[in-house]
Amino acid sequence: MLKTEALKTNKGNFEAMLTICSAGMEDLQWWVDNIEHAFKPVGMPKADITMHTDASKLGWGAVLNGTTTGGRWTSLESQEHINILELKAMFMGLKSFCSIIQYKHVQAYMDNSTAVAYINSVGGTKSIHANKSGVGV
């Protein structure tokens, strides 16, 4: 996100200097510390278990093997963008079923393409808030 903003500010000049804030430095340090263990396989193995989630401005729900869970958003949460709520619904579903899905490859079904893209990419470059909503972290 810093690079994108710097390119906008400098009219696409890749040679321009960029000042990295402390949060950017923390992110870079995480990569330095974890790059040897980070990988993303080209193909995904067959899932062990399937979970469906959904969110609305009122609350969220998740279904795993016919077992359902869900809850209501607080008044503050309900004001968040639906993309954030969809990511939080997935996160809450994973937390709710953690004893069942621990050490399993979970295939997640969601009806929000932005949330799916953030999960598949393990975060994104458009929204800091989406990255910090739980799933992409």
Image (cartoon, helix red, strand yellow):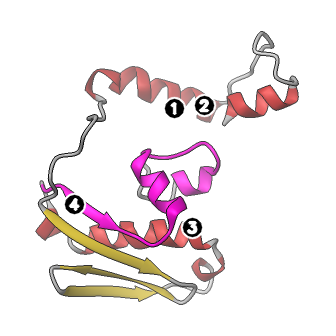
- Classify mark 4: residues with Cα within 10 Å, few (<14), some (14-19) or many (20+): some
Q: Amino acid at mark 3?
A: Asn
Give how far across and how far down residue 12 sits, in percent.
Answer: 82, 22
Question: Which residue is under mark 4?
Answer: 106
- Classify mark 1: residues with Cα within 10 Å, few (<14), some (14-19) or many (20+): few
Question: Which residue is under mark 1?
Answer: 27
Q: What span is colored magenta in the figure?
A: 104-131
The disc at residue 83 is 3
Evaluate if marks 1 and 2 touch, with contact meaning CB atoms under 8 Å apart: yes
Give how far across and how far down residue 54 sits, in percent.
Answer: 42, 79
**Closer mark to the observer between disc 4 and disc 1:** 4
| Residue 125, quarter of the rendered image | top right
How far is mark 1 from mark 3, CA to CA?
A: 23 Å
How far is mark 4 from mark 1, CA to CA?
A: 27 Å
Sequence-first tag of 2 and 3: 2
Q: Amino acid at mark 4?
A: Val
The residue drawn where x is 83% and y is 31% is: 8
Q: Amino acid at mark 2?
A: Gly
Q: Amino acid at mark 1?
A: Asp
- Classify mark 2: residues with Cα within 10 Å, few (<14), some (14-19) or many (20+): few
How far is mark 2 from mark 3, CA to CA?
A: 24 Å
